[in-house]
Amino acid sequence: MKTYKTLLFALMAIVMQFAVACNNDVPEPPQPEPPTPEVPQPLTESHTLTIFMQGNNGLAEFMDSNLQRILASYYDMPEGDFRIFVFYDRGNYTRLTELYMNDGMAKQRLVEEYETSVSTVDKEFMRGVLAKVKEEAPADSYGLILSSHGGGWVPSDLYDVYLLNEGTRSNTPQAQPLFYAQDDYDCMEIPDLVEALSDTHYSYIIFDACFMGNIEALYDLRHSADYIVASAAEVLGAGFPYETMIPMLFEFDDHSLKAICESYMEYYKASSGTVALIDCEQLEPLAEAMRAVMAEMGEVDVDDVQAYDAFDYHLYFDLLHYVELGVENSTAFEKALNKAVLYSGHTETILTATGDVDSFDLARSCGLSCYIAQGDCPATAAAWRTTAWAKAITE
């Protein structure tokens, strides 16, 4: 009997332990460690950078200064297999040079001199210059900095009409014609720029030019580079901080593009600036997300949308703000946008030459501008509908 009771008590103890165990919360399995952030690796491949400066348009004084800053940056270059070429159309001379060190001095080697009468915004001319660089310095990868006036997707002849007649409430011109780029009074349209760049795929393109951070132009350029750095608003004449930027492009395999954007904003934090880093591979998914948005888009008062210019009838609006005002739920679009825009920064005020004010408030910026068709500007709306971006999101 005693043995039986002992076994019974033992069995009851086991049952009670089991019940207690079942009633207790089962501890969660350990969570996996978060992925370690990718650390940029030193740039080991050969890399050729071309800096394409078109200053025969009122920008020569600024570009002279920038060229000196570029030369000064050469003293701080990291070790590596790299070469840097500078094309500069100043008006009184047009030449392609290569930077090099001689007796401890940064100098320029003349590669080719061109007739000053040549139009440097001719797509075949630009293509020839870039081909010459590749012939001189074949590399594993290529980078490109484009410095000139800029106006993004807006055709230059329409921009003139826009200023004089359609886009203002007066007949007084408010600015010079822009696009990318400008040589005297000739301008290069974005489709021509795409063709000029078509022989080389660039690791990055940096636009030291106004208004190039608009989705219409960037969508056209989506196959030209892996990444694009551009401003949705106006860029001050001093341009990018070349003395620090140029060495950064050769330090790491990601070319320090995010850090360059951050240094740009640090440089202009007390004045005026906005800049974004764009992943070109994500522009197609962004177009798909925008197409879904456009199918649900309600009526939006353009006066409520953040603009990047001071024209009476704006050409450049904040893309995300437009979407948020037009649809009830913008979550899916924002996810696509966050993948496409890897960095975005802006000051609270933008200095401008596009209106009768010196500056305007920039309360928000997603990094990308877009055009919103307006009934008061039918020619502008018609031109916008011919862009690849408009077709991708509406047809």
Image (spheres, rainbow, N blue to C red):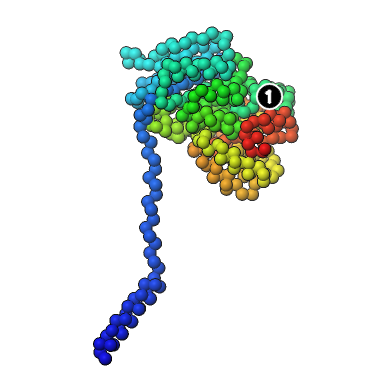
Kindly state the secondary structure of the residue where label 1 is placed. Answer: helix
Relative image position of residue 90 (x, y in whole percent): 52, 13
Residue found 67% across the figure and 38% down from its top: 395
The image quarter in which residue 119 lies: top right
Compared across the picture, whether 184 is left or right of 162 comes to left
Left or right: residue 183 compared with residue 260: right
**Residue at the image position 50 percent from the left and 29 percent from the top:** 225
Report whether residue 309 is seen.
yes
* x and y, in percent, of residue 121 in the image: 58, 17
The correct choice, above or below, for 385 with respect to 73 in the image is below
Placement of 85 over or under 42, stated as above or below: above
Judging depth in this view, the residue of 57 and 87 nearest the camera is 87
Question: In the rendered image, which quarter is residue 80 located in?
Answer: top left
In the orientation shown, which residue stands out farthest toward the left? 3
Can residue 180 be seen? no
Against 389, is 158 above or below? above
Among the 4 quarters of the image, the one containing residue 172? top right
The percent position of residue 385, horizontal first and vertical second, equals 68, 32
**Residue hosting label 1:** 158
Q: Is residue 24 left or right of residue 317?
A: left
Q: Residue at x 61, y 23 (%)?
A: 189
**Quarter the N terminus occupies:** bottom left
Q: Residues within 10 Å of mark 1 (few under 14, many from 20)?
A: some
Instruction: Establish if 296 lies above or below 73.
Output: below
